[in-house]
Image (spheres, helix red, strand yellow):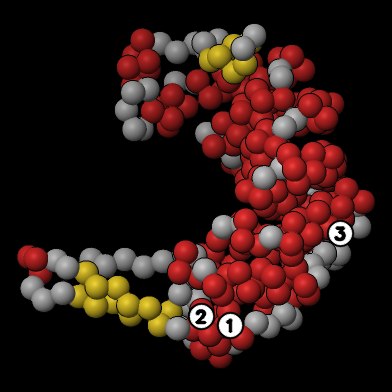
Amino acid sequence: SLPISPHLSLSLPISPHHEAESRSVHSHRRLEHGGATAALAEAACARASELEPQAIATVALSLVKLGAASPEDGRRSVGLRALKRLARAARRRMAAFNAQDLDSLASAYARLGLPRWGAKLASAIAAAAVALGTKRCTPRHLANVLWGVAKLSSSCRLARGSVATEPSVVSLCEMAGGAIASDAAAFNARDLSNAAWSLLTLGLFDRPTMLAIAARAAATLDSFNAQETSKLLYAMRKSGVHCAALEEAASRPREQRLELPLAGPPILLTHMLGGGRAKGGREETGATAATGGALW
């Protein structure tokens, strides 16, 4: 029995054998083999309309992380039916969602990645975030919701290769842009890179906002990982916004010294965090899309 809200739980038929296995690090896949994920999806299908906002967001995110609606299952899978019913239930209760619930809900359906689906949900999530405002929506939640809405919009009619015109999405971008321009320091590395990519994807970026992101990133680039840097530089390049300080910081070689007592002398690794994007992109530098490396 999973207590997904103070007043509601979903009972799943898990055998003692699977209950013991759930303690292992591989429990999710083993439980799926035992039917627990399918049971959760069936229960969500039956009781979606009874769930509170927090439970809707939690169950939706759990189903997506468990792979309950993987592409190979087809469009009639129980997991996909559950997620669509949860989405309808969320739209009916959207005014009751807080910032954390909106964050989880947007993240869940953005990760789902269904083609040509999600316009109504993206619009509803954007409108709810705007209604909460920046006083009740922290920079982290605002950036995550913006990213989720952008991902959903890019797979449906809201922003497929064009500028988004849905009023709620436009308002969300304006709110996020205003918050970043007025206090970019409140956003961390992941937030800034996601915001830049999202505003570019929705076609609703403006120069002051992108410059505020670039200036803050230039001053704190040591806190960015390779993926965040690559995403940020891509957004800046595609938007036509240039910031000399950011480009210089991203092009500066970094060194990492590894002390391995059993391997002899210390190993010195030199790399460029931006992967060459700041110098003109892979066409001019030969940089690839890879954002990580390994030392064997």
Looking at the picture, which amino acid does disc 1 mark?
Answer: Ala
Closer-to-camera residue (223/239): 223
Counting other residues with Cα less than 10 Å from the Cα at mark 3, is it few (<14), some (14-19), or many (20 or more)? many
Mark 1–mark 3 distance (CA, rounded to whole Å): 30 Å
Q: Which of marks 1 and 3 is in front?
A: 1
Look at the numbered disc 2 and give the secondary structure of its residue. helix
Using the image, determine if residue 291 lies above or below residue 144.
below
Looking at the picture, which amino acid does disc 3 mark?
Answer: Ala
Q: Name the residue under label 3.
A: 164
The image quarter containing residue 244 is bottom right
Is residue 152 visible to us here? no
Closer-to-camera residue (62/140): 140
Mark 3–mark 2 distance (CA, rounded to whole Å): 32 Å
Q: Name the residue under label 1.
A: 245
Using the image, determine if residue 123 lies above or below residue 78.
below
Looking at the picture, which amino acid does disc 2 mark?
Answer: Ala
Relative placement, left or right, of 116 versus 271 is right
Q: Name the residue under label 2.
A: 249
Q: Residue at x 74, y 81 (%)?
A: 240
Q: Residue at x 65, y 82 (%)?
A: 243
Chain-order first, disc 3 or disc 2: 3
Q: Nearer the viewer, mark 3 or mark 2?
A: 2
Asked whether the residues under the numbered discs 1 and 2 touch, taking CB atoms below 8 Å apart as contact, a structural biologist would say yes
Where is residue 252? Give x, y as percent.
Answer: 45, 83
Look at the numbered disc 3 and give the secondary structure of its residue. loop
Using the image, determine if residue 263 lies above or below residue 31.
below
Using the image, determine if residue 108 lies above or below residue 47.
below
How many numbered marks, from 0 up? 3
